[in-house]
């Protein structure tokens, strides 16, 4: 009913002159078009992004979405409209007649009379080179401790200390290797297994998990970095929703009722940005009692992350500029005082808490040299310091936990349910 | 000169009547079309597969190849020809005029007057589901021994024997996990890191390498399996040649002169098939002296593999039906005698030797039960045996070493040169 009223209002506001043949088309949102209960050939115009394309011999089906609804509008066009430009992600303006659909899948569809491509979308143009970073490594990246060590099994004839000549571990992040490669390819990413020997029985930790990590040279601000992060979340989610609607619906229907609306809410809003300092103020003023008392200089715990997201109206929120003392040596010094921070950024999302972590990297040789010296890491990271001696550039990057991402969009409570062979404390089946 | 003669001959054989306007088009191979030295608008017809598409505002460029040449023929068409069906891998018949090209990249090009799509190629239809198999595993898959063991580093508070409660290793193959998933998705593949603690300083071994592995349910013959393997090699190679011609050319020009011809030779010939028993006969009759004397029941060594490939005219060769005693418990018993073999298959390629290994899997409960009992593995592989108790199907699969594949197509002698961060005995840099 609401949709039909909107449609009528839109049609009325468009033109009051009774000139049915040449009446200009009424511009409708996808939500309003979908809500039209008694569509009977009204001439309308819809703008949005193509979410799927199905090309048949005589007819072309497009699904167009403009963010006003999680559901897309089906556009039916003569096959003569077909062109390479009508591809996933392209933005289009479609004019045509809104009619009752013959299919049971939707009430209405748009019979296209004119399709104009507003902006092309050639997915190959993103310019990120896919790098396979190694799993076995002699560096521990974050100095954070929770490592698995790798040794040849006792049956092997090589003495274990001689296999690689140095102690080796399972990677906790491909970041440092990506930083090497970003010096050759400018924009790089990796998608691979990552390991943490954390003794955690939580619903959001695994001993073996997947991360998407990206590193971008010539990037100078957290703003630019956050734009890539938000874009990755939204584009990937729209792609998943478009390519596997049945799978997503299964989860939303039987496991996480209401998740469809929560996800739509995340997609249609701009993500928020608060500083770590602001976050601490919000937590201190909270009526809720926390297990860990919030104070400047302390880490955010899951309970804090969940409170902040709720406080932000269940919209994903970037928390930026963390205390220098909390973060690893490679994050860029903000040179502020008296509260000394680095240009770090975490993205907190509903249901999960921390989903992304990233930062600008310290590209200034002398800053990095001093930080390494203070941590006693100069010798181990000489090669990394050298990256700043020869052709250093401002750069930054981030990592996104893939299983947590799946938890977030599907509404799955336990991370062990989004991976076929979960590995965690006390369990390594098969 | 040769090409021009062919072209003239083709034109002559097509029609001897002097009727230039309505003369039917002469059918030419891509090789012959490319060889035409003085193309001046002859009307010809070329059939082949699209290797690349570049769509501009007013003109469409296709590269078409029919296997007669590693180089493709450039087809230039009006943009009105553009359609979604003109995609990578589609087969087409193009009629038009062969003309001198204005670009320096090629001598001739085909100005299209008619383009007919013979067979569509929608790459999403391959029907293989991508599975991430785990890196940390409690099984050793091949029982072959050369394993890395994984333990929490000494800083962790969990006693190491309690972390996973069982000893765990880095995966040597995702096969067994893929077999689980092929029981749900029919056709599955994985592409991920794999580990062998082999104390080898050879030019074709790494401690950490990538494998493409596939598993196919309802597959009943090695013939069908080999078809998938040959298809994977050829399609992937054509895709690489089409998408990264400059990179490939760089290697071929400066590192491996002559490799372009060797690769063309591999692509245009059907791969050969010999049995292990035949292979042994060939080796025994060889004039060459081998370090390891070839005899039935013994493994093939690199020197044998290289000899066999040379003997087969530098065409990749499948070796099938290996001695049962040489192979792991899961390979399908051929029930032959007196030389008892299993339905295993290795693909040997020029320059590298073994590139693929695969087999039909033993799907018969009682056969597998006996093999496991004989190896004392019944308890450890009870879960695997259960896959044959409930809904067992004939199936098979293979793995292809990705770095060796790159060595093979690029002509790179040392495997350490085709991976950014190589890990091998005595070396784990960064």
Image (tube, coloured by chain):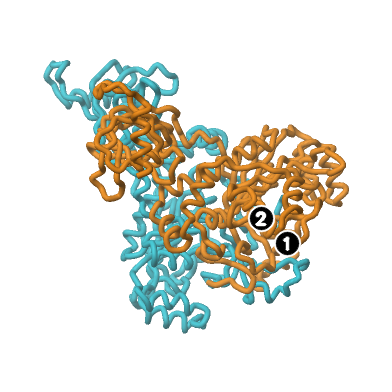
Chain colours: A orange, B cyan
- Image quadrant in which you'd find residue B370: bottom left
Q: State the image coordinates of residue B425 (x, y, percent, origin top left).
A: 68, 58
* Horizontal arrangement in the rendering, residue A225 relative to residue A402 (left or right): right
Q: Which residue is mark 2?
A: A307
Disc 2 from disc 1: Cα separation: 10 Å
Neighbor class of circle 2 (other Cα within 10 Å; few <14, some 14-19, many 20+) is many
Tell if the residue under mark 2 belongs to the same chain as the one under mark 1.
Answer: yes
Viewer-side residue, A280 vs B375: A280
The residue that appears at 38% across and 52% down in the rendered structure is B230
Depth check, front residue: B244 or B34: B244
Residue positioned 32% across, 37% down in the render: A75
Q: Chain of mark 1?
A: A
Residue B370 — which label?
Answer: none
Q: Quadrant of the N terminus of chain A?
A: top left
Q: Are marks 2 and 1 in contact (CB under 8 Å)?
A: yes
Check disc 2 and report its element: helix, strand or loop.
helix
Work out whether residue A12 can be spotted: yes
Q: Position of residue B186 (x, y in %)?
A: 36, 62
Residue at left offset 55%, top offset 42%: A269
| Residue assigned mark 1 | A290
Query: In the rendered view, does A360 fall on the left or right side of A191?
Result: right
Q: Position of residue B119 (x, y in %)?
A: 26, 41
**Protein chain holding label 2:** A
């Amino acid at each position: 009913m609401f949709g039909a009223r909107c449609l009528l209002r839109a049609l009325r506001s468009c033109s009051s002159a009774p000139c049915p043949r040449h009446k200009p088309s009424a511009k409708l949102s996808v939500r309003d078009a979908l809500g039209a209960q008694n569509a009977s050939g009204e001439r309308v115009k819809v703008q949005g992004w193509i979410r799927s394309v199905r090309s048949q011999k005589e007819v072309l089906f497009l699904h167009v979405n403009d963010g006003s609804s999680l559901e897309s509008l089906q556009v039916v066009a003569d096959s003569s409209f077909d062109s390479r430009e009508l591809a996933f992600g392209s933005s289009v303006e479609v004019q045509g007649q809104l009619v009752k659909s013959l299919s049971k899948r939707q009430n209405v569809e748009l019979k296209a009379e004119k399709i104009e491509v507003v902006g092309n979308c050639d997915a190959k143009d993103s310019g990120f080179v896919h790098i396979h970073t190694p799993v076995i490594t002699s560096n521990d990246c974050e100095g954070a401790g929770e490592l698995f060590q790798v040794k040849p099994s006792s049956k092997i004839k090589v003495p274990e200390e001689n296999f690689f000549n140095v102690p080796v571990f399972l990677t906790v992040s491909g970041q440092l290797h990506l930083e090497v490669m970003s010096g050759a390819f400018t924009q790089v990413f990796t998608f691979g297994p990552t390991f943490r020997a954390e003794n955690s029985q939580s619903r959001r930790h695994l001993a073996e998990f997947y991360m998407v990590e990206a590193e971008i040279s010539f990037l100078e601000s957290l703003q630019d970095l956050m734009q890539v992060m938000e874009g990755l979340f939204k584009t990937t989610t729209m792609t998943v929703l478009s390519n596997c609607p049945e799978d997503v619906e299964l989860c939303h229907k039987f496991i996480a009722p209401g998740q469809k609306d929560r996800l739509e809410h995340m997609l249609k809003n701009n993500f928020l940005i608060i500083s770590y300092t602001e976050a601490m103020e919000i937590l201190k003023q909270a009526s809720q009692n926390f297990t860990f008392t919030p104070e400047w200089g302390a880490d955010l715990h899951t309970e804090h992350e969940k409170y902040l997201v709720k406080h932000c109206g269940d919209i994903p929120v970037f928390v930026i500029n963390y205390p220098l003392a909390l973060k690893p040596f490679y994050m860029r010094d903000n040179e502020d005082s008296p509260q000394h921070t680095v240009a770090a950024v975490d993205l907190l999302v509903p249901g999960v808490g921390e989903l992304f972590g990233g930062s600008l990297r310290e590209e200034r040789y002398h800053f990095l040299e001093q930080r390494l010296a203070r941590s006693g890491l100069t010798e181990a990271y000489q090669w990394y310091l050298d990256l700043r001696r020869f052709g250093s550039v401002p750069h930054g990057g981030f990592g996104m936990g893939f299983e947590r991402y799946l938890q977030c969009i599907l509404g799955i409570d336990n991370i062990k349910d989004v991976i076929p062979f979960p590995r965690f404390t006390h369990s390594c089946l098969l």
